[in-house]
Image (cartoon, rainbow, N blue to C red):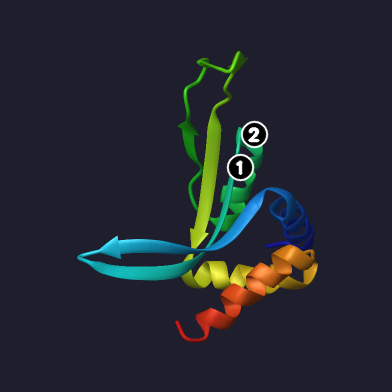
Amino acid sequence: MKLADLHWLAGLLEGEGCFAWQKSTKNRYQYKYPRISLTMTDKDIVARVASLFDVRCLGPYGPYGKLHRGHVRKVVYSTQLYGPRAVSLMRRLYPLMGRRRSSKIKYILERTKQW
């Protein structure tokens, strides 16, 4: 990933992204793994992030054109990066993020040492 793309991604994820532990249950076993996700209504932006993640852009989701409290809801698009690739990207993003996001990334990275 180019440095300019990394900085653009850091700015976007600072405001709109999510850094988390994904919980999954299979055969009564619970698994947790690191995840970076982005969900928003701008398809072109989500598609660009999906391209940088080298994953698919998911969507459209949501009730397109249906009224909600007098407003038309927009279609939502999403992309996610899981596991070791998410950890690698978190390490690169860490010094570029604000206090709250870098704290969350640090929390996740500290727990991936055990993972």
Residue 53 sits above or below residue 42 on the image: below
Residue named by callout 2: 42
Mark drawn on residue 46: 1
Residue 27 placement, left or right of 30: left
Position above or below: 32 against 8: below
Q: Which residue lies furthest to the bottom in this view?
A: 114
Q: Where is residue 88 in the image (x, y as percent from the top left)?
A: 59, 73
Identify the image quadrant of residue 22.
bottom left
Q: How far apart are marks 2 and 1 (CA)?
A: 6 Å
Say if 106 sits above or below 82 in the image. Answer: below
Quadrant of the image containing the C terminus: bottom left
The residue type indicated by label 2 comes to Asp
Circle 2 — which element?
loop
Task: Tell me residue 38's x, y (percent).
Answer: 59, 48
Foreground of the two, 36 or 9 = 36
Q: Residue at x 35, y 70 (%)?
A: 31
